[in-house]
Amino acid sequence: MIRSRAAAGLGLIVALAVAFTPAVAAPAVAAPAAAPFCTAPTPSTTQPGYLVADPDCTLDGTPFTALPGAEVHTGIVGGAAYRIEVPGAWNGGLVVYAHGYRGTGTTVYVDDPALRQHYVARGYAWAASSYATNGYDVGQGVRDSVALIDVFRRVTGVRARSVIMSGASMGGHVTAVAIEEHPRAFAGAMPYCGVLGDTALYDYFLDANVTAAALTGVTIEFPREPAADYQQRWREQVGRIVPALGLPSGSTPAGRTWSAVVERRSGGDRPGFDSAFAYWNSAPSLPPLADLPFLFGLYPGLQGGTAGIAEGNVAGNRHTVYRSTDRLWPTAAEWRLNRDVLRVKRAVPADPGLSGVPRVDGRPSIPVLSLHDLGDLFVPFSMEQEYAARAARNGRSALFVSRAIRGVGHCDFTPAELTQAFDDLTTWLRTGHRAAGDAVLNRRAVADPDFGCRWTRGTHRGFVAPPCPADG
């Protein structure tokens, strides 16, 4: 199915009922709503049991139409829906956009990048895929996103002169892997709120939960093959952990220590963390554990540590040293925590290819500019530090720029923050002059009360920290 049309030529539309998780605004597709003039999702030709939503539909059931002066192309290829938009005054550049995690439903759909209007205004074409699967399937995201480069050539009849890869959240992971798997296909990359540390994200989920249990004296386990009743047993254990921590603020001694541990495991001492800690511990987790505080519903032991995609447990903490202070040597309390914490052995590492949870080497061959919220405790700021450290080990630090944003949410960026980042990246590509960023690996710089002020544009609700100098 391949269709091409301009603004005047509209296809039929389909309404999708979309459920949003309040804390992370990550949509999970429900059954398509019945509505007149809608084209029902069609069975996937590659994934048994999957449906592919009509790419001519937006999420609220209105038609997907071209911006003024632009032309759009839509279709379904290989079980994945796609959208392409080309401005009338096209500059030869193409942005391939990779979306984030969408739960484990069996309807896939394509939507527009946040910077759609800005891309077109700047003369860039863009392309986006639904991917053929949902779940944390980064490998499929890479395959379907890279395939768009050739789809673009076929449906438009021209080849893009340069391609920028971009993606949010899991799409950031897709972006990081795509530019390493296909180094000659891309000129630059802009991941944001991205999982740039592959399995380190699942280590962080593990860390948060096992330290909470150890600090409150609640015995927990990590079943490699969880029994049918394990989810309820975990609920009961969390039911004892939460009051002992004094959540959401962490008002007990154990809670204050846990807050300090989570802060260090998520990026280190930094502005706004207390507000982020309260925000995320007040937020419900993802279904089916939406009755638990956010991080507790992400415990890797709930699915055997497979992330729903790997062949075994991808999370481990056998050699992790947990700290609640920044002293040179651990305190007696820190030694006790490390003695008491549940230790879990990783069974499956990040995959060197596109299976399981694909590995991010941190070996970019092109300029990469990334953004991350300081208070994001879903995909934490430490993901930026992990990628920066890997790039440094590979001698690629000059090709990676990271910018801290003073927000508490996941992918909580203002349009001004995203547009400035994109414009600075394209200037870097055009002139060869490296864009500016933050010293994310400098512990003192990160802990400075003004950290994140340089690139934050506008107000981020819920972020509480001393005002930036210009705001004082």
Image (cartoon, grey):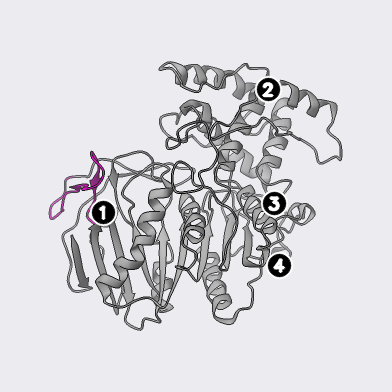
Q: Quick check: is 12 in the magenta stretch? A: no
Q: Residue at x 63, y 17 (%)?
A: 218
Residue placed under numbered mark 3 in the picture: 465
Closer to the N terminus: mark 2 or mark 4?
2
Res 126 quadrant in image: bottom left
Residue placed under numbered mark 1 in the picture: 78
Mark 1 residue type:
Gly
Kindly identify which numbered label has been placed on residue 470: 4
Residue placed under numbered mark 2 in the picture: 214
Q: Nearer the viewer, residue 167 or 345?
A: 345
Distance from disc 4 to disc 1, alpha carbons, whole Å, reads 51 Å
Give the position of the C terminus as an image quadrant. Answer: bottom right
Closer to the N terminus: mark 1 or mark 3?
1
Badge 1: residue crowd in 10 Å (few <14, some 14–19, many ≥20):
some
Decide: is 419 above or below 98: below
Mark closer to the observer (1, 2): 1
For the residues labelled 1 and 2, say whether their Cβ atoms are less than 8 Å apart. Answer: no
Residue furthest left as drawn: 36
Residue furthest right as drawn: 328
Q: Nearer the viewer, residue 140 or 21?
A: 140
Magenta stretch in the rendered image = 34-55
Q: Provide residue 356's location: percent of width, then percent of height.
A: 45, 41
Badge 2: residue crowd in 10 Å (few <14, some 14–19, many ≥20):
many
Count the numbered circles shown: 4
Closer to the N terminus: mark 4 or mark 1?
1
SS of the residue under disc 3: loop
Q: Residue at x 55, y 22 (%)?
A: 222
Please indicate whether residue 453 sits to the left or right of residue 115 in the image.
right
Residue furthest bottom as drawn: 89
